[in-house]
Image (tube, rainbow, N blue to C red):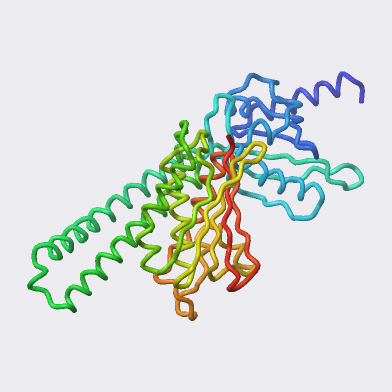
Amino acid sequence: MDLIDLHKIQGRAELYLDLAGVMIVALNSDGIITLMNKKGYRMLEYEDGDLVGKNWFETCVPAYLRDQVYDVFKSLMRGEIEPVEFYENPIITKNNHLKTIAWHNTLLHDDDGNIIGTLSAGEDSTKLDRMKSELLERITHELKTPLVSIKGSTEIISSFYKEKLTPKMVSLLEIIDRNTSRLENLINNILEASRLEIGVLTINKSGNDLSLLIKECAEELQDIAEIRGHTIELKLHNELITQFDYQRIDNVMNDLLINAIKFTPLNGKILISSEILDEYFLISIQDNGIGFTEEEKSQIFKRFGKIERYGKGWDVGIEGSGLGLYVSKKIIELHGGKIWVVSEGRDKGSTFKFTLPY
């Protein structure tokens, strides 16, 4: 076959790729883009040819997912894991738009059978995911409406008819109020987790003092801590100024501190401290509570990865939904930070740590 015939075959192959209704992208074993069709460039909002030679993970994967996705890719290249034929994950376009892509993948091999890269076909499923999110928001709204009515009614009865109630009635009203709040929190967590999963959660960063936020959170939860006999000690820098979404990080800090209060037996100690590293602020929430086994540490940040502790002899109160730490992890990663737990085992306490760049 002469050179002219090879050029014809190559041109015909490129034409077929460009006619495809999906993104086609090939990566070498280092994650460098070696091929992309016109559909891919349109989806990613780049001009034709601009991405060849660029690192896919540094260019097209959101920062909060980059390390995780790249680690999986390198394991694939080393043959340590089998490829997943189909999955979804968000990508980021040239104009910083997040899109959810449904991928079909295959490994590329050389003549000797060595893995040399991947070939993937991706289809934009952002609109479908947004429809799912809108449906879920509608459902959660409908669930919240009767909860607000129930909560309001119990508060009215407790406030205006308390003298006419027996101690048993008062106790039942408290149970209703406590569990409607629990159900409301669960609904909010499910909605938040869904938004995070499909990449539509909005993070609104602004200049804030992380130290002040933590102090306010500790003060708000001081009464709950005192009921359980806990002491909360703060060893924080006077100021920790950086860019973050105040409400989202407040939710993270609130969830971590409530967990420390809840999973530490009576009369425990909780220490919240800060460190300033080269590029990050490091916050630690240490307790002398129940602690975690190695298996539990691998589960707690997963969706619905709660550890069953109720009824096992530990004074932990009401169990959670298993979504709080999952949501917290995603929010910290959206800020460019990391979150993890350190624990030497059962009854040896635990320390939750997270970082935020400054």
Quarter placement of the N terminus: top right
Residue 29 location, quadrant:
top right
Residue 89, position as x, y percentages in the image: 58, 43
Q: Is residue 229 left or right of residue 199?
A: left
Against 167, residue 226 (above or below) is above
Against 37, residue 349 (above or below) is below
Relative depth, front residue between 129 and 170: 170
Q: Is residue 168 left or right of residue 112?
A: left
Q: Residue at x 69, y 29 (%)?
A: 36
Q: Residue at x 46, y 47 (%)?
A: 214
Q: Is residue 99 left or right of residue 227?
A: right
Q: Is residue 330 left or right of residue 136?
A: right
Quarter placement of the C terminus: top right
Residue 239, position as x, y percentages in the image: 50, 38
Q: Residue at x 57, y 49 (%)?
A: 354
Residue 130, position as x, y percentages in the image: 43, 40
